[in-house]
Amino acid sequence: MAINFDHTILAAHDSHASAVFLTQVLGLPEPRRWGPFDMVVADNNP
């Protein structure tokens, strides 16, 4: 199943922990740091 997100920014007290949780729940690769953000990269090629 493909999971698609496009530039979604969510506020969180601990953005890294939230990003790690999201990747684990959705079965995605570990988040990457980009500036002040922890990026969750999804499969955006349907």
Image: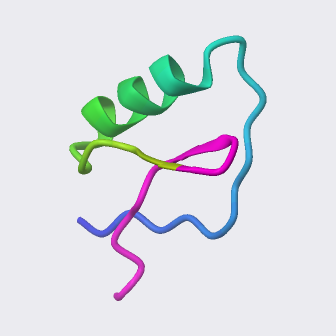
Residue at 41% in and 60% down: 41
Is 31 on the left or on the right of 7, as rendered?
left
Q: Is residue 46 above or below residue 13?
A: below
Furthest residue in direction front, as rendered:
35
Q: On the picture, is 13 further left or further right than 2?
A: right
Residue at (66, 50) in percent of width and height: 35
Q: Secondary structure of the magenta portion, mostly?
A: loop
Q: Position of residue 21 (x, y in %)?
A: 38, 24
Which quarter of the figure has residue 10? top right
Q: Position of residue 32 (x, y in %)?
A: 41, 49
Q: Residue at x 47, y 18 (%)?
A: 17
Farthest residue toward the top?
13
Give x and y (percent) for residue 46.
34, 88
Give the x, y percent position of residue 5.
55, 64
Q: Is residue 9 magenta?
A: no
Please tell me in which quadrant of the rendered image residue 13 appears: top right
Determine whether 42 is above or below 9 in the image.
below
**Of the pair 32 and 22, the residue shown nearer to us:** 32
- Residue stretch in magenta: 34-46
Asked if residue 43 lies in the magenta stretch, the reply is yes
**In which quadrant of the rendered image does the N terminus lie?**
bottom left
